[in-house]
Image (cartoon, helix red, strand yellow):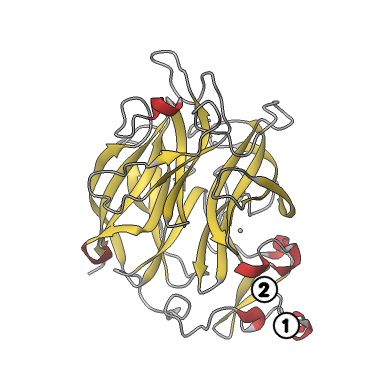
Amino acid sequence: MNSVGRVGVMAGLACLALSSTAACGGAPSTTDPRLSGDQKAPFRLGGVEHVTKVAQLTGHDSINHTGSVEVVGQDLGSMFDADGKTWFVFGDTFGQREAGHTGGGGTEWRSNTMAWTTDRDPADGITFGGYVTDDTGWAKELIPGKKLDNDEMTIIPTYGFAANGAMYLAFMSVRHWGDPGEWETNYAGLAKSTDHGQNWTVLDSPRWDGNGNFVQVSVTNVDGTLYFWGVTHGRFGGVALMRVAGKDVEQQKAYEYFTGVRDGKPTWGKDPAAAEQIVEGTVGELSVMWSEYLGRWIMTSTEGSGLGSTIREGITPWGPWGDPKPLVTQEDLPGVYSPYLHPGYVANGGRTIYFSISQWGPYNVFWYRADLVKSK
């Protein structure tokens, strides 16, 4: 993926009859502070300060010396927990590149790879315990793509999560890389691993339309219900929301899509095309987590207008969501994209957040920190 040119619940017939209501489907109680925020309360996030590059995570010169698994360049780096480890999920990965090469490209191309860590101290960067590797010892391509332009150019994982004792990757099938910040996709779907990430099976269902609002997602588990914030292909649309019980994650009909707020409560439907956008704008590669420091949700993303990466605050998963605030700008890090959060990588009571972020020029992943600033 490039930066300049690049997830309902059915609990019986009674629930189906009420699928447009907030209480249907065994979703978490709205007394949970993550779901019960005052829709009219003022926003708390004033911005960020002390934005600092901590370390380079991938590439020959990184703290992980990834050349040892034939990785000289790769991007993305979203994170999820499974099997007592944190997994970093990467996009297009290359083993050899000419000196001075800018952006994605090179030889020994793998559409996606994944590393793991048990490092819980984010302050000096994240040390990988290893990658999922193939028989040669190289970082392994988990979900093979056809690598045929205008057919299936590549398979890009957008987020991972654990459910039902398995690991899942949400991915998009990319047909063609287009103009800056835009690409064409065939569909979005899920792949599953039951052997600790070593082997992956692409599921026939669920799947979402390649022109819909759930091509790229960020996934969070709230007491057994998975919330998926989604955007379309590229970086020229807004954010929508869907949910499903973790036990039903492989059942297409079990997913529910946020359709608005009625009498102060969220409403849900079964048609992904009817999902209401909860954030307007030009949102790309996104990541959402609950901030204990703010007592609010925070979302980081790539800003499609070319400004860089941004952060915003949400009172509930469906909003309201505040305006975007600069996180890492193009001036800070030229060619910046894909800022990804993890709730375990915070400090100072959650005020300090750590995140992975990609830079197009060297085509590698870096580790950054920032301090959240509360509004006065």
Q: Amino acid at mark 2?
A: Val
Q: CA distance from mark 2 to mark 1?
A: 8 Å
Disc 2 crowd rating (10 Å Cα; few below 14, some 14-19, many 20+) is: many
Q: Is 342 on the left or on the right of 255, as rendered?
A: left
Q: Is 202 on the left or on the right of 334, as rendered?
A: right
Q: Which mark is residue 303?
A: none
Q: Position of residue 59 (x, y in %)?
A: 38, 28
Pointer 2 or 1: first along the chain: 2
Q: Nearer the viewer, residue 81 or 76?
A: 81
Where, quadrant-wise, is the C terminus in this rendering? bottom left
Q: Nearer the viewer, residue 273 or 285?
A: 285
Q: Nearer the viewer, residue 20 or 95?
A: 95
Q: Position of residue 41 (x, y in %)?
A: 38, 78
Examine the image and state in which quarter residue 19 appears: bottom right
Q: Amino acid at mark 1?
A: Cys
- Residue 306 appears in the rendering: no
In this rendering, the answer to whether 148 lies above or below 85 is above
Q: Nearer the viewer, residue 90 or 44?
A: 90
Q: Position of residue 35 (x, y in %)?
A: 48, 77
Give the residue at mark 1: 15
Q: Which mark is residue 9?
A: 2
Mark 1, secondary structure of its residue: helix
In this rendering, the answer to whether 120 lies above or below 23 is above
Q: Are marks 2 and 1 in contact (CB under 8 Å)?
A: yes
Residue drawn where x is 23% and y is 44% of the image: 124
Disc 1 crowd rating (10 Å Cα; few below 14, some 14-19, many 20+) is: some
- Residue 51 appears in the rendering: yes
Residue drawn where x is 62% and y is 80% of the image: 26
Examine the image and state in which quarter residue 329 appears: top left
